Amino acid sequence: MLYDIGVVGLGVMGTNISKNMARNEFDVTTFDFYEDVRKNRTLELKEEGVSVSSSLESFVKSLKKPRNILLLVKAGEVTDNTISQIAPLLEEGDTLIDGGNEQYENTQRRNGQLTAMGINFIGMGVSGGEEGALNGPSLMPGGQKSAYDNVKDILEKISAKADDGKPCVTYIGNNGSGHYVKMIHNGIEYADMELIAESYYFMKHGLRMSNKEMSEVFDEWNQGDLNSYLIEITARILEFKNEDGEYIIDLILDKAGQKGTGKWTGIEGLKLGIPLSIITDSVFSRCLSSLIDERAQINQAYDAEMGALPQEDKNEILEDLKNALYISKLMSYSQGFRLLKEASDIYEWNLQLGEISMIWRAGCIIRAHFLEEINRAYEKDPKLDNLLLDDYFKSVVKEAHPSLRSIAIKAIENEIPVPGFLSALSYFDSMKQKRVSSNMIQAQRDYFGAHTYERIDQPGVFHTDWQ
């Protein structure tokens, strides 16, 4: 028997996506380099009609030509080692697909190496975690278009489906573009999570709300413009109790982990000169959360205590908080898509930004109702520089930014840390100024280093002998 596709790596993701393919009536064979893993997965996968090969050679030979192989192994060195063992067994026209959370530069390097051997290479972002892998993820494949066309049918059938039935997958572009788009997705995810966490923290400490009350508020918010997966699960987290009747959220250490994709996004923003302040502040907030002992010492040294807001203003404050959260999210998306636009131009990827927003509507972690508004913005103006210039975004931000300002003021006055909200407000206030303070910075640079400057009244490059 010859199989439609092969999967290498039988961790949770590889196992679940293999089941997903089989349930969509594709013939699937799998392989893992560890014999004990193969043994442990054989019965589970056999029940789904998925084969587990006993050797890499038999695995490759059992695939229909041109062969399509999906790698779901650890990023970095493990992926390189896996490719080095599989590539010699492949033929011209075969395709390797890396579905890991990989740095796009690594994908570009591998693409060049494999292309020279006549082998296609697709770097594919996969979002949705283990549940998405099984029931339908959002997929972001980038590589040779002809290679994508070979697996398009498989990817469309296994992907998540939006409310209109459209599959949450599209051809992103050539080379490392698929993993790049996944990186930006994860950067936006960092910002989303930070802003929601700050909203929870503001309610808990500023408004002294119970977990039950906060859960009800997030449920209510999820019925409107804020409708999203992360808002939904926040409501569920806040109401969840253990067998002793204790809220789990109150027992969790305030130390957030990270796997690097948010940091990569921030580095790319610095590299291309595009401000990603909300995303980078979200990364730094996770870094700060890890300094537990240090925070405890500073807390004691400064006798820190957050203030409480008047309960009679609670409903009005909650309405402001909802608006603040919504437009701060819009700001973070505008930053992320601005970086995508810049990367598309510089790396010549021709990214279809509207289509990218549409494949994030289901299956992925940042799935949200207003992604359709982003698509409408780019359908209306494919060359749109910044989402803040779109009519929908303009109307929302103009109406709601006083709410963000109000929440920021209350947080500052009551010593409630909300770095994401403050970053969103600073970004907006800076972007809407015709002139910012950087003329002083340029004057300073010219003063101490003769770095020169440009003028507003005449063209050219100038230097002043300041002393």
Image: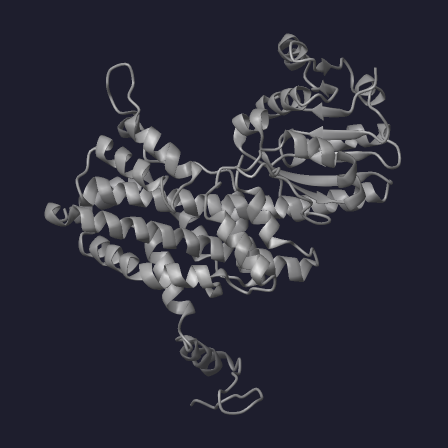
Q: Is the residue 400 above or below the residue 55 in the image?
A: below
Examine the image and state in which quarter residue 363 appears: top right
Q: Position of residue 48 (x, y in %)?
A: 65, 13
Q: Quadrant of the N terminus?
A: top right
Q: Residue at x 23, y 58 (%)?
A: 409
Examine the image and state in which quarter residue 117 appears: top right
Q: Left or right: 346 with respect to 377? A: right
Q: Nearer the viewer, residue 186 or 354?
A: 354
Examine the image and state in which quarter residue 348 appears: bottom right
Q: Nearer the viewer, residue 376 or 414?
A: 376
Q: Residue at x 21, y 50 (%)?
A: 317
Residue 130 visible? The answer is yes
Q: Quadrant of the C terminus?
A: bottom left
Q: Nearer the viewer, residue 267 or 368?
A: 368
Q: Position of residue 201 (x, y in %)?
A: 27, 42
Q: Residue at x 43, y 89 (%)?
A: 466
Q: Position of residue 128 (x, y in %)?
A: 53, 33
Q: Position of residue 352 (x, y in %)?
A: 64, 53
How are the colours assigned in the image?
one colour
Q: Is the residue 390 above or below the residue 166 in the image?
A: below
Which residue is the extreme one toward the front? 164
Q: Is the residue 144 above or below the residue 423 in the image?
A: above
Q: Left or right: 286 with respect to 249? A: right
Please tell me how many numbered marks the rendered image carries: 0
Residue 417 visible? The answer is no
